[in-house]
Amino acid sequence: MSALLDVSNLRIELTGRHSPVTIVDDIDFSVEAGEVFGIAGESGSGKTMTALSVLGLLPNSMRASGQAVLGGRNLLTLSPSALRDVRGRQIAMVFQDPTSSLHPMLSIEHQLTEHLRFHLGLGRDQARQRAFELLTEVRIPDPAAALNGYPHQFSGGMRQRIQIAMALACEPQLLIADEPTTALDVTVQAGILRLLDRLRRDSGMAVILITHDLGVLSALADRMMVMYAGRVAETGTSAEVLRSARHPYTRGLLDSLPHPEAADQPLVPIGGTPPNPAQRPSGCAFHPRCAYATDRCRREVPPLIRLDSDRAMACPVDPFAALALSV
């Protein structure tokens, strides 16, 4: 069965007066219809740029090469007008901060109905009725009054729900959710995750969930890809990766999470900081922060090695192999 979205050899470069800087370095992944595919990693790992490249929303200073095939078309080579037909209709995106993605001067009705009329050709009354239904679907209290409101009149959680309603308006095949719960408190975060899960189950759409929090992926994602410094560190089913992480970076992300059954246990952060893309270390980019690094790690960029039919990892040392086999 062919994937809904098939990305291969994706490379994103920042161009300028000097030599191009590689932001995303030759990554591959696919998303099946109806599944939640997670992309995890710290800030600066290339997660968001990967998503923006698929939608043709990269800054003018960046260029993407490779393939991102949806419905037999390579999205990376489509014209701007063709991409406008894809955005919202086939692929929609929920951004991290609804405050910056919702227009402060336009009513919720205006923002919800604009692309309904553009993509679906609905009349004003039909578009308003559809907007009312969408707000009801994402459980906005008093949706009729909400349509007449403005973004500043809603809480952060409600603004995020409104943004999700906008993304779902034209029934896309694929929803990209970029850190949709980062700015929300824990209770509201759980509600947004439940909403995303319910909506994708009801509609059958696929979801790419981008996050730095592996705990979020454990609740929703079927498969996941861990990125570091623009490269894939590890990929596989979420259950396997989270139960028996093989890459030291993935293990570090897991160890830095609070333990639900040991609140007094201290967190174990990953030492150091992610590298600047213009100053990426030689070899494995994670080696300056890795306790298991060898001379080979410092010299050679590790290839993504297939561990089994579902899992792959880019680490020649594989320090947790024995532990994974015992799980």
Image (cartoon, rainbow, N blue to C red):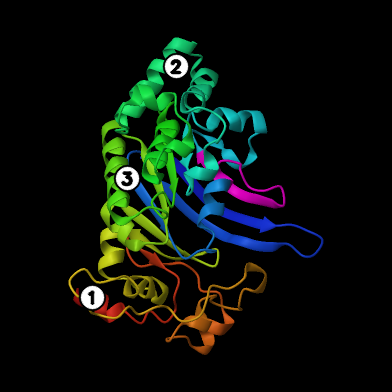
Disc 3 residue type (three-letter): Ile
Q: Position of residue 260 (x, y in %)?
A: 21, 68
Q: Quadrant of the C terminus?
A: bottom left
Front position in the image: 169 or 304 = 169
**Direction right: furthest residue:** 17
How far apart are the two marked residues, 3 and 1, measured between alpha carbons?
A: 35 Å
Q: Is residue 27 above or below residue 73?
A: below
Instruction: Give the residue pinned by disc 2.
Output: 127
Query: How many neighbours does mark 1 have within 10 angstroms: few (below 14), some (14-19), or many (20 or more)?
Result: few
- Identify the residue at image location x=42%, y=61%: 212
Q: Is residue 194 above or below residue 315?
A: above
Q: Position of residue 271 (x, y in %)?
A: 46, 81
Q: Position of residue 39 (x, y in %)?
A: 42, 56
Instruction: Give the residue pinned by disc 3.
Output: 192
Find numbered disc 1 in the image and state the secondary structure of the residue it sits on. Answer: helix
Instruction: Give the residue pinned by disc 1.
Output: 325
In the rendered structure, find residue 300 and report the number of the disc placed on it.
none
How far apart are the two marked residues, 2 and 3, measured between alpha carbons?
A: 25 Å
Whether residue 64 appears in magenta in the rendering, the answer is yes
Q: Quadrant of the N terminus?
A: top left
How far apart are the two marked residues, 1 and 2, measured between alpha carbons?
A: 55 Å
- Left or right of 236? Residue 166 is right
Q: Which residues are magenta?
A: 53-69
